[in-house]
Image (spheres, coloured by chain):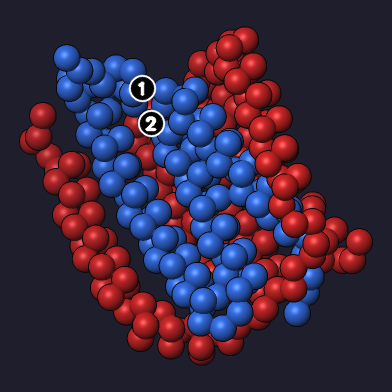
């Protein structure tokens, strides 16, 4: 195994473990801390895939903005921000279903080609040209949806509404 | 130019999607639901980035562009979701989605 492969395996295991930890811990603030590590970990995977622009975007939008937004959501809806949630009740049926799904996924992965893929790197200038020229309408659509979402969010949280 | 295992990325994305679906099905707190949706959405974005890196030429660039747009969509979804959290908390006094039953028959 070369250095990149070892780094990928370490980052992948960390991503899955932090994702599970974020959902299983009982303090909501600890959930946010775990999910922040998860986002930073995925950003490192993007850097490993030679996609530095997306890596920085992941750090800024997810690890920065989304994490702080979720933290504000907890702060404004709780008297004590370290209050605990009820534990997850995982019954035998859901556990059996999870085991069956896991066996199915492992069997399906065995059908995939087992070789190593050479990752192609892209010039950020070429990416920005593609993003703003060829895929420009998608960006305009995103802007329109963001504007609508801002209006919707303001409508939801405004005063005097029951 | 680096070489990485193909099956590893698909396995990682599938595992993250499974973790997200597990959270959506088992948790009742709205913020934990949002976190679960974010984990599942990150699995999707990871697939786009990986297959973009796997492809060469314009197809790869388009994959990364779609991933950029998806990150924007995810941020929008969290903003509206937190608006719903605040509204639910004001009306019900809790953010437990099991208590939001107004639209049930």
* Quadrant in which the N terminus of chain B is drawn: bottom right
Examine the rendered structure and indicate whether residue A1 appears above or below residue A158.
below
Q: Is residue A80 above or below residue A128?
A: above
- Output the chain of dot 2: B
The verdict on a common chain for dots 1 and 2 is yes
Query: How dense is the environment of label 2, judged by Cα within 10 Å: few (below 14), some, or many (20 and up)?
Result: many
Toward the top, the furthest residue is A92
Instruction: Report x, y in % for residue B80.
Output: 28, 47
Q: Quadrant of residue A80?
A: top left
Residue that badge 2 annotates: B30
Q: Residues within 10 Å of mark 1 (few under 14, many from 20)?
A: some
- The outermost residue toward the right is A1
Q: Which chain is red?
A: A
Horizontal side of residue A136 vs A118, given as left or right: left
**Colour in which chain B is drawn:** blue
Q: Residue furthest left?
A: A160
Q: Nearer the viewer, residue A151 or A141?
A: A141
Residue under circle 1?
B96
**Within the image, what quadrant is residue B66 found in?**
bottom left
At numbered mark 1, what does the secondary structure look like: helix, strand or loop? loop
Would residue A7 be seen by someone viewing this image from the given angle?
A: no
Looking at this view, is A104 or A92 the one in front? A104
| Residue under the point 50% across and 70% down | B63
Residue A31, how many percent across, how many down?
56, 36
């Amino acid at each position: 195994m070369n250095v990149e492969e070892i780094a990928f395996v370490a980052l992948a295991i960390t991503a899955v473990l932090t994702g599970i930890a974020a959902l299983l811990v009982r303090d909501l603030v600890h959930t946010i801390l775990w999910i922040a590590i998860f986002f930073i970990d995925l950003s490192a995977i993007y850097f490993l895939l030679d996609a530095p622009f997306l890596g920085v975007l992941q750090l800024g939008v997810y690890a920065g903005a989304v994490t702080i937004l979720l933290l504000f959501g907890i702060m404004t809806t709780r008297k004590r921000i370290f209050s605990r949630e009820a534990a997850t009740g995982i019954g035998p049926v859901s556990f059996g279903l999870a085991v069956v799904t896991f066996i199915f996924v492992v069997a399906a992965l065995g059908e995939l080609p087992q070789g190593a893929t050479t990752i192609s790197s892209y010039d950020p200038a070429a990416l920005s040209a593609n993003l703003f020229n060829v895929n420009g309408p998608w960006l305009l659509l995103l802007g329109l949806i963001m504007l609508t979402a801002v209006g919707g969010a303001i409508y939801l949280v405004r005063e005097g509404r029951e | 130019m680096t070489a990485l295992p193909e099956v590893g990325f698909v396995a990682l994305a599938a595992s993250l999607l499974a973790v997200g679906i597990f959270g959506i099905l088992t948790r009742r707190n709205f913020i934990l639901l949002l976190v679960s949706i974010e984990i599942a959405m990150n699995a999707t974005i990871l697939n786009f980035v990986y297959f973009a890196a796997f492809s060469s030429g314009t197809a790869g660039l388009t994959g990364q562009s779609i991933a950029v747009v998806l990150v924007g969509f995810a941020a929008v979804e969290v903003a509206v979701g937190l608006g719903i959290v605040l509204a639910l908390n004001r009306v019900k006094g809790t953010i437990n989605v099991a208590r939001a039953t107004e639209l049930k028959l």
